[in-house]
Amino acid sequence: MIIFTVTLLVVFAVSIFYCTRKQQRYLKKTIKKQWRLLSIALTVCAFILALQQFSTTAAVFFIIFSIMLMLMLIPFVSLLQRKG
């Protein structure tokens, strides 16, 4: 259950981070950069929860791997949207 929560927190954090970038294609207008603090806070919470489940090295690897995977997959969501 903790792993699912960690993964969900990382997905939300990366989604918020992606939507604050000006190069994003998901929203018509980017959200404000102040939302990045929430993204960082969610990532820190996910890391703390991952430390409860894994050793330190495994937690760091899991968080970095999850962030990289989500940063590669989330831009493809904009391709699934129907245009007009």
Image (cartoon, grey):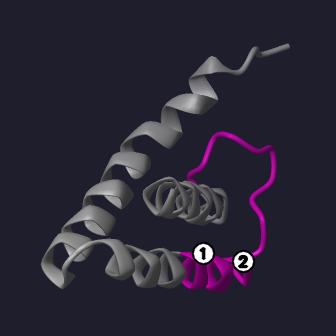
Tell me which corner region of the image, top left, top right, bottom left or bottom right, holds residue 32. bottom right
Q: Secondary structure at mark 2?
A: helix
Instruction: Say if the magenta span includes residue 40.
Output: yes
Number of labels in the image equals 2
- Segment colored magenta: 23-42
Amino acid of disc 2: Trp
Which quadrant would residue 78 be assigned to in this image?
top right
In the drawing, does residue 62 fall left or right of residue 5? left
Q: Is residue 64 above or below residue 47?
A: above
Residue 80 place in picture, x, y as percent: 62, 19
Answer whether labels 1 and 2 touch (C-beta < 8 Å): yes
| Vertical placement of residue 36 versus 1, above or below | below
Residue 3 x %, y %: 43, 58
What kind of residue is marked 1?
Answer: Ser
List x then y, in percent, for residue 45: 53, 82
Is label 1 in a helix, a strand or a loop?
A: helix
Say if the magenta span includes residue 8: no
Residue at the right extreme, as displayed = 84
> Could you classify mark 1 by the number of other residues whose Cα lies within 10 Å: few (under 14), some (14-19), or many (20 or more)?
many
The location of residue 1, given as percent across then percent down, is 51, 56
- In the rendered image of this protein, does residue 56 appear above or below residue 62? below
- Image height check: is 72 above or below 36? above
**Residue visible at 65% across and 63% down in the picture:** 16
The mark found on residue 52 in the picture is none
- Which mark, residue 39? 1
Mark 1 or 2: in front is 1
In the displayed orientation, state which residue is furthest to the left. 57
| Residue identifier under label 2 | 35
Give the position of the C terminus as an image quadrant.
top right
**Direction from residue 2 to residue 78 in the image, left or right:** right
Give whichever of 10, 68 is nearer the camera: 10
Label 1 vs label 2: CA separation? Answer: 7 Å
